[in-house]
Every structure is written in C-alpha cells, then in structure tokens.
Image (tube, rainbow, N blue to C red):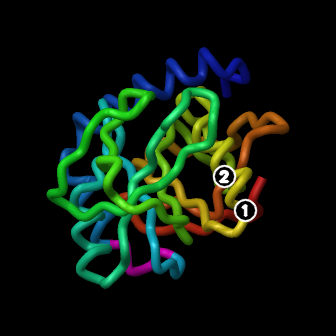
Amino acid sequence: MISDKPALRASMRALRKRLAEADPLAAQRAADCSAALPRGETVALYRAMGSELDTDALAQALAAAGRTLCLPVVLERDATMIFRLWSPGEPLELDAAGCPSPLPLAATVVPDLILAPLLAFDDFGGRLGQGGGFYDRTFAVLPEAVRIGFAYAGQRLDRVPMDRHDQGLHGVLTEVGYTPARKVS
C-alpha cells in the first residue's frame, strides 16, 4: 500500500476512473441496497463530480422511502460545510469549492446521516478523501451524524492511512451492499 497520501490519491483517482468506466450501472445497484443504510430522517448526499459514484438513483430511492434530502454547501474554503434542503430536480449553483449545491433560499438543516464521496476506504472506517478537508472538518462538528462512504467496492483498501484530524466512517455503501465499519477510526 502507498503510505504517501498525495501518491495514494493519484493512484486511487485513476482506479476510480477505471471502475466508473467498467461498470456504468454500479450506482443503480448501490441505490438498490439503500434500504440497508442506518436510520436517518435527514440524509446528506453530494452531487457527483468526475468519476465519483453518482447519487441520482440513490437520491430517488431515499426520497421514495420518505427520507428528507440535503446537499453540502461550501461557503468558505477553510470552514465547515453547511447543508441545505434539496430534492431531485431542484436547481443548483456552484458553491465556493465549485461543487453543485442548493440555492441560498433553501433551508439550512443538520443531517442525521451523511453520505460522502471518497477515493478509498477500509473496513475500519478509514476514508481517503480528495484532500481538501471539507468532510473531516464537518464530521468533527457533527459527531452525532452517521458517516457513510458511497463508493465502488473496488475502492476498498486493506488500510487507509489516517492522520489525527481524519474522521472515520461508520460504514460504506457500494454496488455490492452496505458494510458497517468494524471500528470507526
């Protein structure tokens, strides 16, 4: 395993791109497993960028199950994210990080369950993100929220290198199902 995080990120970005190209139906299969997710009335998703596992089918499944949806919003690059209510089909605009997010008129909420994109994960709650720290900072101020990675099963590593500030996941949802973490890092 590569222990240098920048090198590992580059390697995992390339792998994720190959996984996305090889299995365009993975996101739908993952959405079909959404009933196995932990409880949570208000669920935060993300709008996929690049080769991130797309959340469209998952959003539809969660909305159909009666869950309230929201998306993260970056207001300042070094701050925690906020979350605004959102439903599939509602208009979005780019936030301070260049990610699609709900318009400012949408209500701000605190999610019970947060599904986060990632580059790599392990069975112990380890998560390798893009390196901006947005999710780690936000997870740290929302300790009661259940933190779930949303990824391709092929993004799993034996162990993700974790620093002191890194916040672990409670589980991961992939195209093969939901797996709770053995121990949150």
- Label 2 sits on a secondary structure element that is helix
Quadrant where the N terminus is found in the figure? top right
Residue 55 can be seen in this image: yes
Q: Is residue 156 left or right of residue 162?
A: left
Task: State the residue position of label 1.
Answer: 143
The image shows a total of numbered marks equal to 2
Which disc number belongs to residue 86? none
Give x and y (percent) for residue 64: 23, 80
- Residue at 54% from the left image edge and 31% from the top image edge: 76
> What amino acid type is highlighted by mark number 2?
Phe
Main SS of the magenta part reads: helix
Look at the picture and state if 59 lies above or below 129: below
Task: State the residue position of label 2.
Answer: 139
Residue 29 can be seen in this image: no
- Residue at 60% from the left image edge and 60% from the top image edge: 147
> What amino acid type is highlighted by mark number 1?
Pro
* Crowd class of label 2 (few under 14; some 14 to 19; many from 20; radius 10 Å): many
Look at the picture and state if 78 lies above or below 91: above
Residue 176 in which image quadrant: bottom left
* Crowd class of label 1 (few under 14; some 14 to 19; many from 20; radius 10 Å): few
34 drawn magenta: yes
The segment highlighted magenta reads 33-37
162 drawn magenta: no
Mark 2 vs 1: CB contact within 8 A: yes
Give x and y (percent) for residue 138: 63, 48
Q: Is residue 184 left or right of residue 83?
A: right
- Residue at 49% from the left image edge and 28% from the top image edge: 12
